[in-house]
Amino acid sequence: MLDKIHDKERKASLAIKDDRDCQCIAHRAFYGLLRSDDTCASCGFTSTTHDPCMDISLDLSACYSNRKDFASKSSKPNESLIGCLDLFTRPEKLGSDQKLYCENCHEKQDALKQMSIKKLPLVLCFHIKRFEHSPTRKISRKIDRRV
């Protein structure tokens, strides 16, 4: 719905070159910025990027998984919005297949990624990821816990 509102406004005003310049109701109310810090595990150099967002996707599977065929990031269930936000902003070690190019080392290195909210929108929307995918068995299951 927000995309449709934005698209209609954008077509009506040819002066909008960037979403940050858009003054449609969708962007005035829901537009925010996420910050991603990638830190090289070898030298500690941090690269920061900012990405626009209209909502934030929160992962429940990391909280609730205790089966061996599903990845688990936490051993105790977390059924609060604060807990889900904690998981969203917690530093995450990237896998060996996700090495990042370090501008300081000039080669691909292991890294830590940490997300944070750079600019809060007036209305912050959360998208709860309700499915968990197993990389080994290539199956999915619905997470039916309450938040």
Image (cartoon, grey):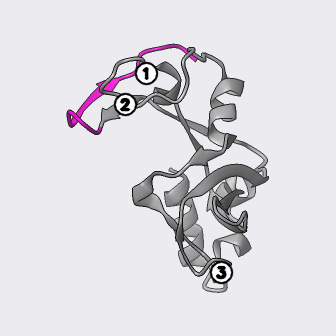
Q: What type of secondary structure mainly makes up the magenta span?
A: loop
Residue 1 coordinates in the image, percent (x, y): 50, 50
Q: Is residue 68 above or below residue 14?
A: above
Q: Nearer the viewer, mark 2 or mark 3?
A: 2
Front label number (3 vs 1): 1
Mark positioned earlier in the residue sequence (2 or 3):
3
Q: Amino acid at mark 3?
A: Ile
Q: Secondary structure at mark 1?
A: loop
Q: Which residue is mark 2?
A: 132
Q: Nearer the viewer, mark 1 or mark 2?
A: 1
Residue 143 on the magenta segment: yes
Q: Are marks 1 and 2 in contact (CB under 8 Å)?
A: yes
Residue at numbered disc 3: 16
**Relative horizontal placement of residue 127, taking residue 125 as reference (left or right):** left
Residue shown at the point (59%, 45%) measured from the top left: 92
The range drawn in magenta is 135-147
Q: CA distance from mark 1 to mark 2?
A: 8 Å
**Secondary structure of residue under mark 2:** strand
